[in-house]
Amino acid sequence: MTFEKEYYEKKERFENYLNSLVGGFRDIPEPLYSAITYSLVGNGGKRLRPILFLAAAQLFGAKETESLLKTACAIECLHTYSLIHDDLPCMDNSDTRRGKPSNHKVYGEDVAVLAGDALLNMAYELLLDAVTLCENTSKHNYIRAAKLISELAGSRGLIAGQVVDTAVDTEKHVSARLNYIYQHKTADLITASLLSGAVVGGASEADIGKIREAGDNIGYVFQIMDDLIDFESGEDEGKNTFVHIYGVKEAKRAVSDRTAMAMTQLSALNGDTSFLRLLVKNLSIRKN
Ligand code: GRG
């Protein structure tokens, strides 16, 4: 099977489950229901994080159970909430997302804030459902995965990266600051996806350590590619990005170095990592 086919098959299976879950949202009052579904399913993205989670879990032998799929959905809910809140006027003030009006442009700021809050709560509801539904022998792993996800999405993870990115004044040196932002705002949720997948799949402690390192490198590759894509399409609005600080050549070199490191770390894992390695390769040359 080609990489593209495998990616889209995984994406489709994930989206089928996500859609069935959303089918149960009909009792959520309007306009909250529409605002949530607009960003979670109506205007879907690449589903990179749930696919990383599922691929890491399956690498270590996890079956596609309800608990596994609910955890994948929880990760996508966290990602979606972060995008809705990031687009708000008080944050990045972005009118569009995925080529369409951003959530607050359609539903208003008040509803967009609440849709993000609802998705954040939903994520933890799903993580707890996953723990409740899994077999007794897997409970410890699902609890550990939920804790890792909550830490990496929390105030020392994703939110830490966002607050430093948002703050105008900082005592950190420019490169240390950039590093901190990329690590937390982008890499932490990517690492959380891989790491929690490895944990629920029952990976060894040694493999969990390698997965964490690979996740961080993949996160950097993803973010620097995002900067390069924005720069090359003239959409980067002069922000302090890796490309702005170090230039295109250095950015491309960093992508290539970090990709090579991630490949080495993935190759050292016990199991067939071909899908994950092809995914990393594709991220390092992506166009959107
Ligand atoms: C509001 C707590 C909080 C955090 C916001 C997501 C985020 C942090 C900021 C968005 C801006 C940004 C450049 C984030 C880096 C990660 C990133 C590029 C997210 C977009 O991810 P994709 O491309 O999105 O995977 P799709 O549309 O495919 O789902």
Image (cartoon, grey):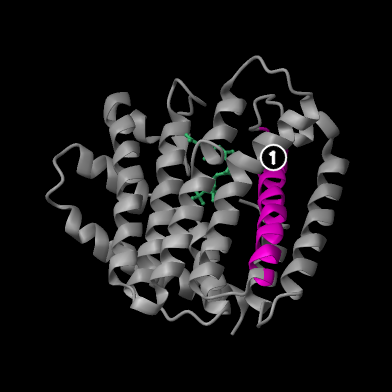
Q: Is residue 55 above or below residue 272?
A: above
Task: Please tell me which residue is depicted at 72% across the width and 54% down the height of the picture.
Answer: 217
- Name the residue tied to disc 1: 227
Q: Is residue 123 left or right of residue 208?
A: left
In the rendered image, residue 71 lying in the magenta stretch gets the answer no
Which of the 4 image quarters holds residue 230? top right
Task: Please tell me which residue is depicted at 63% across the width and 48% down the height of the picture.
Answer: 187
Placement of the N terminus among the 4 image quadrants: bottom right
In the rendered image, residue 233 lying in the magenta stretch gets the answer yes
Q: Position of residue 100 (x, y in %)?
A: 42, 40
Q: Is residue 251 left or right of residue 105?
A: right
Secondary structure beneath dot 1 equals helix
Q: Does the magenta stretch mainly form a helix, a strand or a loop?
A: helix
Q: Residue furthest bottom?
A: 1
Please state which of residues 207 and 282 is positioned toward the viewer in this rendering.
207
Which of the 4 image quarters holds residue 213? bottom right
Q: Is residue 31 left or right of residue 45?
A: left
**Quick check: can you spot residue 204?**
yes
Please state which of residues 128 and 263 is positioned toward the viewer in this rendering.
128
Q: Is residue 229 above or below residue 146?
A: above
Task: Please tell me which residue is depicted at 11% across the width and 49% down the height of the picture.
Answer: 27
For disc 1, the neighbor class at 10 Å (few under 14, some 14 to 19, many from 20) is: many
Q: Position of residue 287 (x, y in %)?
A: 66, 53
Could you tell me the amino acid type at mark 1?
A: Asp
Q: Position of residue 124 (x, y in %)?
A: 34, 51
Q: Is residue 203 above or below residue 160?
A: below
Q: Position of residue 141 (x, y in %)?
A: 46, 68
Q: Is residue 215 left or right of residue 200?
A: right
**Does the residue tagged 1 have its C-beta within 8 Å of any atom of ligand 1?**
no
Q: Which residues are magenta?
A: 206-234
**Quick check: can you spot residue 101?**
no
Please state which of residues 128 and 265 is positioned toward the viewer in this rendering.
128
